[in-house]
Image (cartoon, coloured by chain):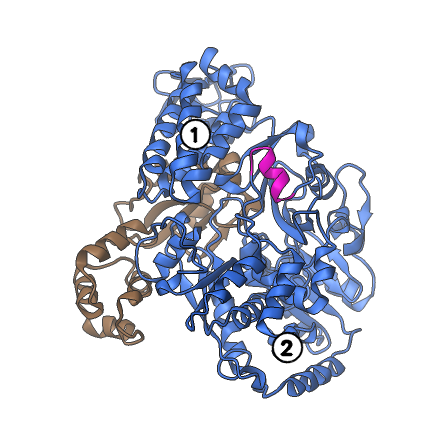
Chain colours: A blue, B brown
Amino acid sequence: MPKFESVDHLNEYRRQLRARRDPSQPQVLVCAGPGCLPLGSEEVAAAFRAQLEERGLGAQVALKASGCHGLCARGVRVLLRPQEIAYQKVTPDDVPEIVETTLVGGGVVERLLHEEPETHEICRHKGDIPFYRSQQAIVLRKLDVIDPESLDDYLALGGYRSLRKIFFEMTPDEVIEAVERSGLRGRGGGGFPTGRKWRICRDTGDPVKFVICNGDEGDPGAFMDRAVMEGDPHAVIEGMIIGAYAVGARRGYIYVRHEYPLAVKRLQLAIQQAREAGFLGRNILRSGFDFDIQISQGSGAFVCGEETALIASIEGHIGEPMPRPPYPAVSGLFGQPTIINNVETWANVPEIINMGPEWFAAIGTEGSKGTKIFSLVGAVHHSGLVEVPMGTTLRQIVFDIGGGIPGGKAFKAVQTGGPSGGCIPAEFLDLPVDYDSLQQVGSIMGSGGLIVMDETSCMVDVARYFIGFLYEESCGKCTPCREGLKQLKKIYEDITHGRGEEKHLTLMEDLCAVMASASICGLGQSAVNPVLSTLKYFRHEYEAHIRDKKCPALVCRPLLKYTIDPETCTGCLACVRECPVGAISGVKKEAQEIDQELCIKCGLCFEVCQFDAVRRE
Amino acid sequence: MDAARLEAILSRYEGEPYDLIPVLQEIQDNYGYLPKDEVKEVARRLNVPLTQIYSVATFYKMFTLVPKGRHQIKVCLGTTCHLKGGLRLVDSLSSRLGVEVGYTSKDGQFSLETVGCLGSCAQAPVMMVDDRYFARVTVDKVPKILKLYQS
């Protein structure tokens, strides 16, 4: 890779690169995204490498480990281009057949194709699969076609071409104006207009400013930022260069959680490649603009996703938020004006410059422009990453894209926005999803976690889970959050242990009112959403726990009773071996019995029984 | 204290107070915990009070002041894993290894931890042993997974 001295040099390199690439060359793209890695995608890629070598096809076929292909539920996914054949659930054992049938023979391995759960429609090409058909990919569009470790792959698809436009055709003010006109709002949770934030920062006139990419994706159930950092790291860097030029910053930080080691590795490599190619460093492409980026790793604290806590963490302190104002755009890192945007926001910026703000503003709703990535998980057939225009309804996301609820179970709720979000019931399935509509029903967009729950989920337990999570993660600085969460946690323990009282419900509402208005940062202010939304839409479940001492969904452990049906039990002793407290006794090949005094209701016996002999009520 | 080992880490930094967290991260990765003597030396070299290091080391979850086991087990308790029975995995591991969450087994082989979210939600419940992910883990798979690491 040369060091690009000018835009002409870059354009010439790109032209030659494209001329060298044969669009009809067979490509095998093995998904190495967050969903497929744990399913063994590295082994699948290794099997392809070995097979291609063995058959002497190593030079003719381009084998790549790509970023996330989206449909994680059917991993390991393999995409064969240029035909766009999408294989699913591929194991190393399937590889010889794929090579023989598709790469050599030009046919299709039918058994590895996608089958729709309800209609049993077989989909040969990626574009035929309903999951992909209803999406519109801007940020995710390159993830399944490039090797994230190859700068050439990024350049061949037009990477870094926005730099010509901003450096040589636009003033920093015009860049900010373009981002303002696009209507882009922060994808990390708050939804603050990105262009306005940049203008506030630029208008300070301070000569020393910083830009930060917030990659501290801590919301349980959200993995879109991980997928983008791992799958298209140069898009984040390109976005940050544009932002830095617009506000006049010389230095940037990418703050990534240490739980995402692959994202750290990919970003480090991408930064190094960008430096060597001259996209970072001094006098970038002879524009006279200097900018460089370094990585700062999180150390495991959810609150560091909050911007002032993140800044404290980069400065070497514990992640305690500061009251705002002043906002970081005025006084941020080391007291200097600082722009913080999240990964998905930065990754949108290059396309806004390339395609123009009007193109972007034409997508989405009145108040929320562009697309949003959701991590669609939980009780849904097609869990994975989806990118849809703002304003797509929950029904379209859960049923058309997600394929609906498995096992013939009934939809109960969808939880959005992570621990700061709420649970939305079935009556709002036709709600067009954007920042404002979600807020109106008591939830938030957050970073885009979208967890589908069916009748087997207990909404009291879900709220208890989030309160427990936030209690652990509260930094403890301000009283409403620290003490409020402690009290809420205690009340949830009482309710789920059968000690709940009617007055608890009003007490919880009172506590929430104080926390929402008096906590310093978003963690405490929005911690009330899981509580209030479940109290509002699923009050009957709370009442069942309090009045009848029952958990209707059979989730809350202390309210359950496990017994063994002597008719069905075969006496295999699997439950006896698993029981952690020795509460199950009996003779081999005879029916077992659970000692109710000893039983801790962990449900391990229920899970290991192969004969459905353990009853839960 | 192995001075050369610590020096190799400190030499990559400017020695400013804001280097504290990356330096501690490297020590944690390198030693598996934050040894007392090394931490004292870091305080001296970065000109940071020992109390601030203690505050940082106990605030962030990745740091520990006691050595961890040979293999680190992390069970994901993100929302999806919670809904799909992640807690039962914790119970099963805890009972099989005889170790509570946050502690190390007596033989020093395994440390058991729970984490907020590993970001592989589509494969819930998920657990990790060292750097390897295990997808869609049911309780009956636990003994097989442990066997891979029990020497």
Nearest to the observer: residue A29 or residue A324: A324
In this rendering, the answer to whether A58 lies above or below A418 is below
**Residue highlighted by disc 2:** A152
Nearest to the observer: residue A386 or residue A79: A386
Count of numbered circles in the view: 2
Callout 1 amino acid: Ala
> What element does badge 2 sit on?
helix
Q: Is residue B125 left or right of residue A156?
A: left
In percent of width and height, residue A306 lies at: 43, 50
Nearest to the observer: residue A564 or residue A201: A201
User: Magenta span: helix, strand or loop, mainly?
Assistant: helix
**Do the dots labelled 2 and 1 sit on one chain?**
yes
Q: Is residue A60 left or right of residue B64?
A: right
Quadrant (top left/top right/bottom left/bottom right) for the N terminus of chain A: bottom right
> Can residue A146 be seen in the rendering of this structure?
yes
In percent of width and height, residue A227 lies at: 57, 57
Residue under mark 2: which chain is it in? A
> Can residue A458 be seen in the rendering of this structure?
no
Magenta span includes A404: no
Label ID, residue A513 = 1
**Magenta range:** A434-443
Category of crowding for the residue at label 2, using alpha-carbon neighbours closer than 10 angstroms: few (below 14), some (14–19), many (at least 20): some
Q: Residue at x 21, y 63 (%)?
A: B48
In percent of width and height, residue A48 lies at: 65, 66
* Farthest top residue in view: A548
Q: Residue at x 70, y 86 (%)?
A: A12
Magenta span includes A437: yes
